[in-house]
């Protein structure tokens, strides 16, 4: 399998889509990157750079970009979906008309569809029936990945051939690809941690101590796993790279978009101004609304989500919310203890 050469398409020319395209090209596979703007396509093909999302990163000269979706996916055995959650369904509908029969489709999007509360894998299953589906998630900040810094990720699917193909495509000296079977758990972990990265960014901008950040991350892990188990995920998934690994990096790094939104909120900006200053999609904003609605409906105890929601949408101050949380937090530390 390791010697097999694939033809691969990455649908979405943002930072992460470009980063994994570069890995696939480095590994000697035939790869096409679909981008919406012709100017961006020309820059990748002629200057081997994506200055909008990964400025200063030299791309493999074998990586080719296209603004034509049909051209990009023609003959491809594997297609990565790396578009934000909002346009995912509409792009999947377009993809359904041009994708090769039986091609593997892998979602790298860490978000949830706002209108339906469905995960990206569920959207892809609806729009691309008959195609093996997988999801990939982990502590994978795109800039560091594109700079070839060592990290790992998880590819999860109910079809073992999906995991084998993705491992063959992406495994290299600086990127370790682990296989998993809890597709929804991996996907939920990637989506839910964005909310807590906003909270951590706020705490950092307010000069909270390391103890505070540590407590936030630990309680976030308990809270997101509690929510995911209600949705049918395995709580043990959250102890791996897709869970605590991704949560830690997005809650501590200014390279995280959601962290940066939270940082601006902590400085007193409105949510609109904070998002505008980012200039990119921060999935955690929409996910926060969904988690608040779902936790209320299902009766799931989620004080961090409730607190952030009150700050962002109900105008409460950080001091008010923190004071209430400190007194209302439940006493039990470990949610899923074995004894």
Image (tube, rainbow, N blue to C red):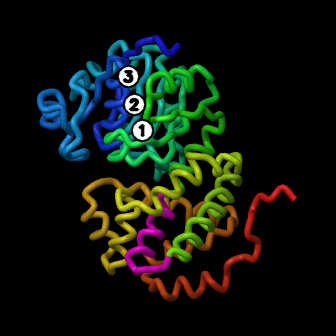
Q: Is residue 102 above or below residue 92?
A: above
Q: Are marks 1 and 2 in contact (CB under 8 Å)?
A: yes
The answer to whether any part of residue 122 appears in the image is no
Q: Tell me the residue at 57%/87% (across/down).
A: 323
Of labels 3 and 2, earlier in sequence is 3
* 1 or 3: mark nearer the eye: 3
Among numbered discs 1 and 3, the one appearing first in the sequence: 3
Relative to 146, is 57 on the left or the right? left
Q: Which residue in the protein does label 2 denote? A: 93
Work out whether residue 156 or residue 174 is closer to the camera in this orientation and state it. 174
Residue 314 coordinates in the image, percent (x, y) = 45, 79
> How many other residues sit within 10 Å of disc 2, few (<14), some (14-19) or many (≥20)?
some
Could you say which is closer to the camera, residue 260 or residue 226? 260
Q: Residue at x 61, y 42 (%)?
A: 184
Q: Is residue 63 magenta?
A: no
Determine which quarter of the picture holds residue 175: top left
The range drawn in magenta is 194-209
Dots 3, 2 in contact, CB < 8 A: no
């Amino acid at each position: 399998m390791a010697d097999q050469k694939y033809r691969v398409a990455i649908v979405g020319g943002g930072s992460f889509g470009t980063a994994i395209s570069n890995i696939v090209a480095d590994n000697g596979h035939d790869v096409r990157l679909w981008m919406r703007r012709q100017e961006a396509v020309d820059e990748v093909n002629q200057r081997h750079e994506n200055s909008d999302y990964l400025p200063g990163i030299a791309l493999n000269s074998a990586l080719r970009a296209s603004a034509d979706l049909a051209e990009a996916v023609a003959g491809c055995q594997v297609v990565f979906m790396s578009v934000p959650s909002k346009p995912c369904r509409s792009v999947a509908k377009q993809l359904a008309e041009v994708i090769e029969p039986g091609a593997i489709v892998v979602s790298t999007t860490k978000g949830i569809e706002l209108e339906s509360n469905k995960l990206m894998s569920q959207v892809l299953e609806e729009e691309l029936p008959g195609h093996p589906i997988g999801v990939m998630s982990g502590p994978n900040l795109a800039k560091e990945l594109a700079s070839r810094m060592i990290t790992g990720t998880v590819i999860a699917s109910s079809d073992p051939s999906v995991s084998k193909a993705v491992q063959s495509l992406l495994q290299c000296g600086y990127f370790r690809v682990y296989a998993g079977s809890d597709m929804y758990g991996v996907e939920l972990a990637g989506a839910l941690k964005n909310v807590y990265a906003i909270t951590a960014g706020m705490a950092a901008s307010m000069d909270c101590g390391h103890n505070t950040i540590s407590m936030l991350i630990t309680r976030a892990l308990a809270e997101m796993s509690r929510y995911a188990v209600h949705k049918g995920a395995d709580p043990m998934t959250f102890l791996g790279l897709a869970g605590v690994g991704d949560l830690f990096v997005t809650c501590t790094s200014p390279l995280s978009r959601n962290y940066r939104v939270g940082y601006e909120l902590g400085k007193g900006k409105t949510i609109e101004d904070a998002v505008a200053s980012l200039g990119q999609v921060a999935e955690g904003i929409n996910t926060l609304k969904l988690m608040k609605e779902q936790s209320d409906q299902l009766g799931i105890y989620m004080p961090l989500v409730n607190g952030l929601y009150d700050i962002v949408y109900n105008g409460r101050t950080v001091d008010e919310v923190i004071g209430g949380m400190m007194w209302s937090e439940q006493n039990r530390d470990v949610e899923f203890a074995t004894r």
